[in-house]
Amino acid sequence: MILHPDRVPVGLDDSKALSERRRDALEAEVKAAALAWGVGFASVPEIDGMNILQATGLAMRRAVEALAIPPAFILVDGSWRFDLPAPVRPVVKGDSLSVSIAAASILAKTARDRVMVELDRDWPDYGFAAHKGYHAPRHVEALRRLGPCPAHRMTWAPIRALLDSKV
């Protein structure tokens, strides 16, 4: 995400602190104001194969590589210094301290929410569209009742525990 310094949308904040409606509105504003933007994902098999932290770095790399303009440096929310194609500066609580990180957070969250809605079409009994992948009671109940589906990470602790309890 490379924002134009003179066109920063008003109201950028941690995506989790914004309503879905506000995130959706800001997503369009961010994309219009950005000099370049990209979103990256890691697949369920990639996450299970490497771990969530390394898969996060892989998704970040993919987002950076999708930029039409290479960045001079990369701000990352948190304390981890991922191996990315430009110098990295971790910023703890970055989505509340940096408009660039907040804007990237909004793009990532809205893209992920769309994926969760798509997953809900394929596996409606899990309520993916309602809880958007968070560990909600409805999701836990569906996991207990139905077991995991192909969209679930088998290395995620609650699923491992569920599978272990059925052995």
Image (spheres, helix red, strand yellow):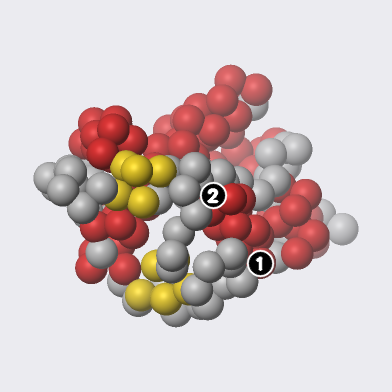
Q: Residue furthest top?
A: 121
> Which one is in front, 82 or 114?
82
> Picture coordinates of residue 34 (x, y %)?
32, 42
Report the residue at 52% width, 34% height from top.
116
> In the picture provided, is 1 more to the left or to the right than 13?
right
Q: Separation of disc 2 and disc 1 at Cα?
A: 14 Å
Tell me, yes or no, if residue 125 can be seen here.
no
Dot 2, how many residues are within 10 Å of its Cα: few (below 14), some (14-19), or many (20+)? some
Counting labels gives 2
> In the picture provided, is 57 more to the left or to the right than 104?
right
Quadrant location of the C terminus in the rendered image: bottom right
Residue mark closest to the camera, 2 vs 1:
2
The residue indicated by pointer 2 is 63
Report the residue at 64% width, 43% height from top.
143
The amino acid on which the numbered mark 1 sits, given as a three-letter code, is: Gln
> Of label 2 and label 1, which has the lower sequence position?
1
* Circle 2: element type: helix
The residue indicated by pointer 1 is 54
Tell me, yes or no, if residue 55 can be seen here.
yes
The amino acid on which the numbered mark 2 sits, given as a three-letter code, is: Ala
